[in-house]
Image: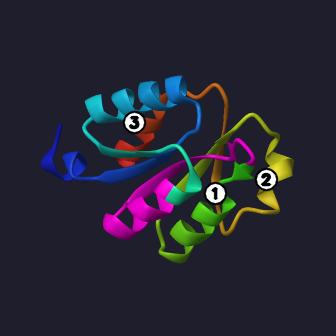
């Protein structure tokens, strides 16, 4: 693992605790500083407190979506991706700017590899 990648703070927003902890472990083992949020309020706090370099956002967070987080990161020129069980067509018209849409279940080891080469 390189020092550059080890310092890369990645925001992970996921409301399912099992998926969140598995994804966090996978990204951390891959050498990323994974900042985990289960909801939009915590995610927004993390965005204010840290210099996030990439974001992985579960689209549906219980009774809300992560669109407000996407708008914030896109406005800050932070690359992001949505993770979802929805179809691409349901999301693409609402997402700010270009976005990767990853279908659940997601292989977070593959996500970590993609982040490594980005």
Q: Work out whether 92 lies above or below 26.
A: below
Q: In the rendering, which numbered label is found on residue 91?
A: 2
Q: Is residue 9 in view from this perspective?
A: yes
**How far is disc 1 from disc 3 in space, using C-alphas?**
17 Å
**How far is disc 2 from disc 1 in space, using C-alphas?**
10 Å
SS class of the residue under badge 2? Answer: helix
Determine whether, in the image, residue 6 is placed left or right of residue 69: left
Crowd around label 1: few <14 · some 14–19 · many ≥20 (10 Å):
some
Camera-side residue of 87 and 110: 87
Residue contact at pointers 2 and 1, CB within 8 angstroms: yes
Determine whether, in the image, residue 86 is placed left or right of residue 58: right
Label 1 sits on residue? 99
Q: Residue at x 47, y 36 (%)?
A: 111
Tell me residue 65's x, y (percent). Answer: 71, 52
Which residue is farthest bottom? 75
SS class of the residue under badge 1? Answer: loop
Q: In the rendering, which numbered label is found on residue 110?
A: none
Q: Is residue 79 in view from this perspective?
A: no
What is the magenta range?
42-63
Residue contact at pointers 3 and 2, CB within 8 angstroms: no
Q: Residue at x 39, y 60 (%)?
A: 46
Label 3 sits on residue? 113
Q: Work out whether 8 lies above or below 114.
A: below
Tell me residue 82's x, y (percent). Answer: 63, 48
């Amino acid at each position: 693992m390189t020092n550059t990648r080890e310092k890369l703070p990645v925001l992970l927003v996921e409301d399912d605790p099992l998926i969140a902890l598995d994804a966090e472990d996978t990204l951390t083992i891959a050498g990323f500083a994974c900042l985990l949020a289960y909801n939009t309020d915590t995610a927004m706090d993390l965005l204010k407190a840290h210099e996030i370099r990439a974001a992985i956002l579960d689209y549906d967070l219980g009774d809300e979506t992560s669109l407000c987080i996407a708008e914030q990161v896109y406005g800050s020129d932070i690359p992001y991706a949505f993770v979802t069980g929805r179809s691409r067509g349901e999301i693409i018209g609402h997402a700010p700017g270009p976005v990767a849409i990853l279908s659940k279940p997601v292989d977070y080891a593959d996500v970590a590899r993609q982040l490594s080469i980005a």
